[in-house]
Image (spheres, rainbow, N blue to C red):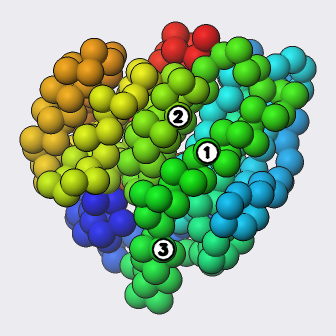
Amino acid sequence: MCDSHTLEDTIEYQLRSGLSRREFGALTLGAGLTSMMVPLARGDELAVTESDVDIRTPDGTADAYFVYPSKGAHAAVLVWPDIFGLRPAFRQMGKRLAGAGYAVLVVNPYYRKQRAPVAPEHADFDDPATRNALMDLRNSLTPATTQTDAMAFVQWLDAQPAVDRRKRMGTSGYCMTGPFTMRTAAALPERIGAGASFHGGGLVTDTPDSPHLLIPKMKARYLIAIAESDDKREPTAKDVLRESFAKAKLPAEIEVYAGTIHGWCPLDAKVYNRDQAEKAWSRMLVLFKSALV
């Protein structure tokens, strides 16, 4: 899954790109990627209002980033970040989504252990200390904590004036949080109208709590954007997902994105693939426009 394969996939990317280990090491999270973190603005983006917020849950106080169009009420989207957590890249992505017309909440899933940021400014998964710390945080999360948090976050969003409660809500997740979107959609089927998983890890497993087994409980349309490297590792997962969504009579766009390495969508990722990330982003917007009504 995403966290356990991140290191080997980034090494594969290093070999593909021809970078030396020293050059590749310079591309740490939040550093060496300034040229990639351009605003990616569109001329028709809406003006937005943004703030850091604290949200009470049954397990404590969760810190999050809330951004929404400055005028009116809009469909809401709950964004679960990857293993590195809430950080500038995800704030930027959330702000861009808000500019497209959505009230966006980007959460810190590790709030029980630590407020964001949970990794150093120039964090590198190659570093054993950073990797071990992030894996400890990752391992503190369970299907039960995800359900608890999803319900608390959705309830908080529905209390905000910027959220149009008449419209269904969306959720998106990256790497380790691809499954979080499915658990959210299954826990709140009447509220979640669309889900998007980007290089999600562990969507199909052989355990009784595999996320794909929750599909019959959902009422959400789906986008599942799969990294080519993940598909090579688990070539049957996409087929299981397609069959499961078809049996549940839920529309799902499930695609392997050619030439991508696991983790290619976040703006600050070492393996960021701008062209394919933009394609996946555009497909998410198409999904949200049709489903969040």
Q: Gap between marks 2 and 3, in whole Å? A: 23 Å
Q: Residue 171: where, in percent of width, then height?
A: 54, 36
Q: Which residue is mark 2?
A: 188
Instruction: Determine contact: label 3, label 1, CB under 8 Å.
Output: no
User: Disc 1 residue type?
Assistant: Met
User: Disc 2 residue type?
Assistant: Leu
Query: What SS does tag 1 mark?
Result: helix
Q: Is residue 40 left or right of residue 8?
A: right
Instruction: Identify the residue shown where x is 30% and y is 69%.
Output: 4
Q: Identify whether 247 is placed above or below 201.
A: above
How many numbered marks, from 0 up? 3
Q: Could you say which disc has been placed on residue 140 in the image?
A: 3
Viewer can see residue 240? yes
Q: Could you say which disc has been placed on residue 249 in the image?
A: none
Q: Is residue 39 left or right of residue 221?
A: right
Badge 1 crowding class, 10 Å Cα cut-off, few under 14, some 14 to 19, many 20 or more, is some
Residue nearest the viewer, comparing 169 with 279: 169
Q: Which residue is mark 1?
A: 151
Badge 2 crowding class, 10 Å Cα cut-off, few under 14, some 14 to 19, many 20 or more, is many
Where, by quadrant of the figure, is residue 77 drawn? top right
